[in-house]
Amino acid sequence: MPTPEPAATEPVVSYAPEATPVLTEPVERVTPVEPVRARRKGVNAWILAAVVAGLIMIAAGAGYWGSTVTGELDRTRTTIASRDTSISEVDSSVASTQEKTNGEKSRTAVAEDEIARLHGLSAKKVACITAQGKDFDELRRIFEEQKENFDRTATGSKFAKADAAAWKAAETAMNDVENSYKSVAGGSITRANSWLSKAIAQTKIIDAKIKVINKEVKAINSSTDATNAALDALGAKLDATARTCGA
């Protein structure tokens, strides 16, 4: 606080006894005028103290702030260093992972090539089996056709029945002709003609059966030709199958 100034004192007017004036009228009391004090030059002590205190506080705050900032910078540097170490570790891990990935890609490529090769072999085997199956089906068809062709001459077939009937008719006709000659020798023309008529009837039977036989023979020959052509074609197919199934 500023120092209080001393209280002003009223000036005292003294008069000599012998020169005491006589006042005929009341005199008003004159209020003394306070002397004007000259304004002191320089800084007030309180202001200076306040300024000094402020500077001290600023310096203290600056020191605290500087200490705080320095600590924060140190922690930031430590964090950055830690992060740099982590980034380095991550980079190393990424490089290791990339190397492993490249290795896996290489192994995958080899595996894919092997799979493609196996697929190729599998497709080739499928083609081979398919071709062999078709060849077997064709061979079985040809066999069935040959069997059917053979059955055309087997016992009980049209050919066999017609052949048997033709031979029987031929034998009967020969016997009838023989009997006709005997009748002529015995002097019986009528009986001879009768036997001759029977022989002629048997020859008609033979002709009819021979037509059946010829028809069957023609069918057999046609089937045989078709079978032979099928066998030739199958031979070419078997050659192609052998190439398909080859190494």
Image (cartoon, rainbow, N blue to C red):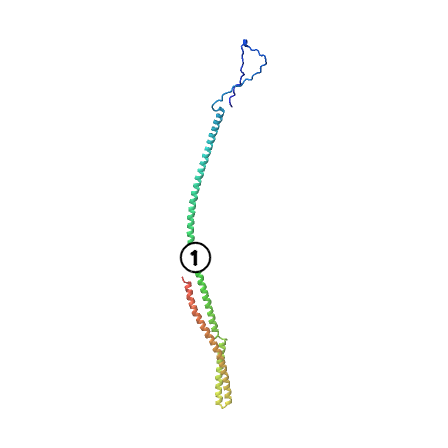
Instruction: Tell me where residue 12 sits by quadrant.
Output: top right
Q: Is residue 9 left or right of residue 97?
A: right
Specify few, some or many for label 1: CA neighbours under 10 Å numbering under 14, 14-19, or 20 or more.
few
Q: Quadrant of the C terminus?
A: bottom left
Q: Say if 37 sits above or below 77 in the image.
A: above
- Check the image and name the residue furthest to the front: 24
Count numbered badges in the picture. Answer: 1
Instruction: Tell me where residue 90 sits by quadrant.
Output: top left
- Check the image and name the residue furthest to the top: 18
Q: Say if 116 sits above or below 48 in the image.
A: below
Instruction: Tell me where residue 84 sits by quadrant.
Output: top left
Taking the spot 43% from the left edge, 57% from the top edge, the residue there is 116
Q: Say if 218 sits above or below 120 in the image.
A: below
Judge by depth and name the residue closer to the eye, 109 or 215: 109
Judge by depth and name the residue closer to the eye, 8 or 84: 8
- Check the image and name the residue furthest to the left: 247
Q: Say if 27 sits above or below 219 in the image.
A: above
Residue 225: % across, % down:
44, 73
Could you tell me the amino acid type at mark 1?
Ala
Is any part of residue 116 visible from this angle? yes
Judge by depth and name the residue closer to the eye, 45 or 184: 45
Q: What residue did someone put label 1 on?
A: 116
Residue 111: % across, % down:
43, 54
Helix, strand, or loop for circle 1? helix
Is any part of residue 168 visible from this angle? no
Residue 11: % across, % down:
53, 15
